Amino acid sequence: MSERQGLGHRLSEHELSEIRMLIEERTGICFDESRERFFSTRVHEHLRAKGLSRGTDLLRAMRKSNVEYEALLERLLTQETSFFRYPGVYEAFEKRVLPELHVKKFWKNPRTLRIWSAGCSTGEEPYSIAITIADSLSFADSWNVEILATDIGRQALKHAEHAIYTGRSIAGVTERQLANHFSAVEGGQQVKPRLRKMVSFALMNLASPVYIGRMDGIFCMNVLIYFSEERRRALVQRFYETLEPGGYLFLGHSESISKMPVKFQAIVLNDCILYRKPIADELLKPELVTEGRA
Ligand SMILES: C[S@@+](CC[C@H](N)C(=O)[O-])C[C@H]1O[C@@H](n2cnc3c(N)ncnc32)[C@H](O)[C@@H]1O
């Protein structure tokens, strides 16, 4: 059996593959060839940090205890994010989606807008959504805005709840947004309570469906890329069922669902694609619509 030696601890290919399968089975996250090096380096780091000398000890500990399993999982998550990561997406949300939802829902009682940020990492995405709503939805304060932000990473969610950001993470925030929505605190800029009240964070594994009610919009950006094709399909189907008719799905730039058998209308707006769930009598319309500026 081939073994990789590293600073006194040993992991066989077989053990690495067992760990890989355990993580994929429970979370949907795949470590294919392109991410093999990342995976193996992180598992070795973890073994060293735990003071374990053998891969079998790690596997046994992970199978026995959820705490041990989560400790390794935390190391294997890719949580890169930032405020307004893709400006085009927020422009489309502001100029196309919010006006449409305003017309559709303004006279409803209660006047509720529900958005899900699935795979929200440290919170920059749901707070960017909240800023966009606060700044551009007409009579924003008269709406009951609920942004549900979920992730599988406990540490990331803790950071998100503290809502303190610095450096590259807030580089995309304008001076005006910074003045209106953040307060300078020790350690960086903290999102003000008015926005924080709009966002609820919850630990949620996208590979284990939980009922969360209907949504007007779902942001699931840069998450599906880590999943197998089969999981992606299942998740996109679930997003379709979760959306209200007329609701929108936002994916990351490299994530396409064009080959999946779901009935979203793909709307190309500048450099982004939005996926809209048709309302009943629109189901016969063309599925791809290309429009000009958002
Ligand atoms: C690269 S980050 C994307 C953050 C943000 N959506 C963005 O685009 O900036 C991917 C996030 O997906 C989360 N994630 C990965 N697998 C998950 C799963 N099975 N359930 C929930 N969240 C998951 C990771 O913890 C990580 O925070």
Image: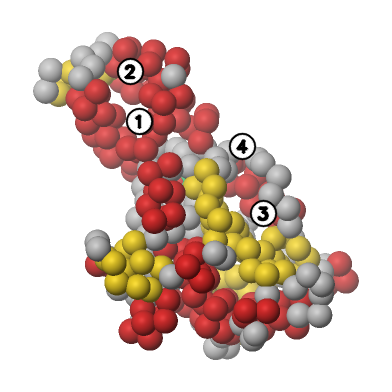
| Mark 1: secondary structure | helix
Determine the CA span between mark 2 and mark 3: 35 Å
Residue of label 3: 239
Front residue of 117 and 87? 117
Closer to the chain start, of discs 2 and 4, is 2
CA neighbours of label 2 inside 10 A, class few (<14), some (14 to 19), many (20+): many
CA neighbours of label 3 inside 10 A, class few (<14), some (14 to 19), many (20+): many
Rendered location of residue 182, percent (x, y): 38, 73
Q: Which amino acid type is marked by label 2?
A: Leu
For this view, does 106 lie left or right of residue 273? right
Closer to the chain start, of discs 2 and 1, is 2
| Mark 4: secondary structure | loop
Q: Residue furthest right?
A: 281
Determine the CA span between mark 3 and mark 4: 13 Å
Residue drawn at x 36%, y 66% is 190
Front residue of 23 and 197? 197
For this view, does 175 lie left or right of residue 274? left
Front residue of 157 and 97? 157
136 is higher (above) or lower (below) than 244: below
Q: Ligand 1 near label 1 (Cβ, under 8 Å)?
A: no
Find out whether the residues at labels 3 and 4 contact each other: C-beta distance under 8 Å: no
Closer to the chain start, of discs 2 and 3, is 2
Rendered location of residue 101, percent (x, y): 71, 77
Q: Which mark is residue 58?
A: 2
Residue of label 1: 72
Residue drawn at x 28%, y 39% is 38
Q: Which amino acid type is marked by label 1?
A: Leu
